[in-house]
Amino acid sequence: MKLSTKKMVWMGLLIALSFVGANIKIPSPFQSIALDAMPAFLGALMLGGTAGAIIGFLGHMLTAATAGFYMTIPVHIIVAVMMAITMVGFNFAYKKTNLIGAGIVGILLNAVGAPFILIFMPKFGWPFFMGVVPFLLVASAVNVILGIAVFTALEKSGIQINKEFGQNGK
């Protein structure tokens, strides 16, 4: 990943927005689900999969820190890695399809794929998975739709995102 000054500034801005989103919570039976992923989805579209992965990883860790790492730090690291993988998959889907296809992939990876890994960990299992997935589907859909909406608005506004970042993350 080639890092220009402009790309690093955008990444820093999106990581900061992840922290803000970490403080906007959707209640669920398992603590709360934050709106920290929208900047990562936006970053994956604008800056590419690797940048989106970094933003997603750090965004989740900030969210977990604001909640006191309630699932333990090792579990949150696993979830943050899954967020990073989600952003790479989201960007890959965008390159191969379009925004709608990428949106569907992003929602499914974030809401179903990421918590699926926790099934195999002690104290989680199927009850956790079945309980959290409906709330993650809602939160993921909100994050993905907002990320796509902001990306589309930035494209239409004339901001030169395609020349600086490799054709809109493609």
Image (tube, rainbow, N blue to C red):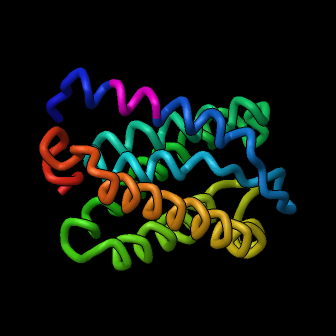
Using the rendered view, name the quadrant where residue 122 is placed: bottom right
Numbered range of the magenta stretch: 9-13
Residue 36 appears left or right of 104:
right
Looking at the rendering, in which quadrant would you find the C terminus? bottom left
Using the rendered view, name the quadrant where residue 66 is placed: top right
Q: Does the image show residue 49?
A: no
Looking at the rendering, in which quadrant would you find the N terminus? top left
Magenta stretch holds residue 132: no
Residue 118: give x, y in percent of width and height.
61, 59
Q: Does the image show residue 55?
A: yes
Main SS category, magenta section:
helix
Indicate whether 40 appears above or below 2.
below
Along the line of sight, which residue is nearer the eye, 63 or 114?
63
Residue 96: give x, y in percent of width and height.
19, 72
Using the rendered view, name the quadrant where residue 69 is placed: top right
Q: Which residue sits at x=62%, y=41%?
A: 76
Residue 14: give x, y in percent of width and height.
46, 36
Residue 40: give x, y in percent of width and height.
45, 47
Q: Which residue sits at x=27%, y=31%?
A: 7
Residue 38 appears left or right of 23:
left
Q: Which residue sits at x=52%, y=43%?
A: 80
Q: Which residue sits at x=65%, y=51%?
A: 35
Residue 96 appears left or right of 67:
left
